[in-house]
Amino acid sequence: MSLLDLSLEEIRGKLQKKELRVADLVDASFSRIASVDGKVGAFLTLNEEAAREEARQKDEKLASGGERGLLFGLPGGLKDNIVTEGLRTTCASKFLDNHIPIYDATVVSKLKQAESITVGKLNMDEFAMGGSNENSAYHVVRNPWNLQHVPGGSSGGSAAAVAAGEAYFALGSDTGGSIRQPAAYCGVVGMKPTYGLVSRFGLVAFASSLDQIGPVTKNVEDTAYVLQAIAGYDPHDSTSAKVDIPDYTGALTGNVKGLRIAVPKEYMGEGIDPGVKEAILQALKVLEGLGATWEEVSLPHTEYAVAAYYLLASSEASSNLARFDGVRYGVRAENPNNLLDLYFRSRSEGFGDEVKRRIMLGTYALSSGYYDAYYLKAQKARTLIKQDYDNVLKTYDVIIGPTAPTTAFAIGAQSGDPLTMYLNDICTIPVNLAGLPAISVPCGFSGGLPVGLQIIGKAFDEMSVLRVAHAYEQSTDHHKQRPPLLKEVQA
């Protein structure tokens, strides 16, 4: 058993009693990376020298009895679209292959205040555009539960690293399900906080009205701790919300008696794998046994979510990625004939196919003559989708359904069919359009692969979401299951 399999409270206790050093935790992380990441491919850049030096300094602090931060000594990984001062940040794109940021994202600064240790930057779909992690410009990430299957995306590296025990926790970004879907595929916990709860300053923008940073962990308690560390108002982010930050660990009571759950029929109908549906129904039975009640409801505008999302997200991506022109930073085409040739060749050579596809779609949707027909209609559909959630959440405490309609699919199975790939996010996309908090927790297996249960709450009511997730988790042992890959390593 790896040290990283211990609970956060167990690690704290052992550090306090001097039974464990921070260096031991960092050693365990890099040892696991060395043994399995050649197969998994979760990391793009390691931070080994700096991490070991930080561990040494923290062990000195531990010996002197100094006050410790919330995540003291815990090895964490960061999705490679979160900028880190002095540590390469590529967004898994050849365009930023040589990019070394000169500042830290706000969440990175907050993790440093909490005294965690960054062990490296994690692989992803290029510029967070994709749902399988097959769109990385460097290499495919593989699912630790079955190396022939995808880990999900775009935060596939984050989910795979936690599932494979390479990092104690990770941060990802969620634009249309990019934390929750890979968490479901890899059998770990992934949370998308309410839009505005966690600063986006230093997150390389994909779709600014949708992007949100969140934690990926082994269990709900760890999610509460990491969220506690990174949440809060940031004047550097114009969309950051000035709200009080509660003690998220206080939500972990195990009590859901009297809880009212809504189950959208749109999330349990056509296109949902029978094995996934059965796992969700079994999860609802567990919650019923804990004193909760559930009823079927309708979110009638869900059918428009995928179309609206891809128009809006692609439009915002078209605007955000205009800054990547080969002039100020990133890779520059050699020997251009003129300025226009520099732009054309730098972007043609630097961006991958999926990024180009979305830039073209977004530019088209925003162009003269098509703005009203596409972008404006998509914004109106977004409003209707949000109203659906608002109406249901007036009566119910949370909304529950599957995180993804299927389990992880085989590598290459959908890479030639973008539309089918996009439909994998049908259960997660509407939550981003509405800006609500949601978490994915393991709820069983189908065909030997993990299934995720999605719990959606009211805006800034992360407490209820965490309370339900934790109560369910404590009544099952799905989160304790580990991939066969780890059994092979430990053998």
Image: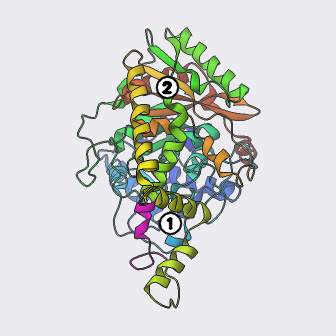
What's under tag 1, amino acid-wise? Answer: Thr
Q: Is residue 81 above or below residue 335?
A: above
Q: Which element type, helix, strand or loop, lies under badge 2?
A: helix
Tag 1 or tag 2, which sits nearer the N-term? 1
* Residue 469 badge: 2
What's under tag 2, amino acid-wise? Answer: Ala
Q: Residue at x 64, y 33 (%)?
A: 405
Q: CA distance from mark 2 to mark 1?
A: 33 Å
Side of 20 relative to 482 (left or right): left
Q: Which residue is mark 1?
A: 90
Q: Is residue 72 above or below residue 206?
A: above
- Would you call the spot at circle 1 few (<14 residues within 10 Å), some (14-19), or many (20 or more)? many
Q: Residue at x 37, y 50 (%)?
A: 111
Q: Is residue 444 above or below residue 94?
A: above
Q: Where does the image place residue 212, in percent across and percent down from the top left?
A: 41, 46
Asked if residue 346 is among those painted magenta in the image, a careful observer would answer no
Q: Which residues are magenta?
A: 318-331
Q: Where does the image place residue 106, in percent across and percent down from the top left?
A: 32, 54
Q: Where does the image place residue 121, in percent across and percent down from the top left?
A: 51, 59
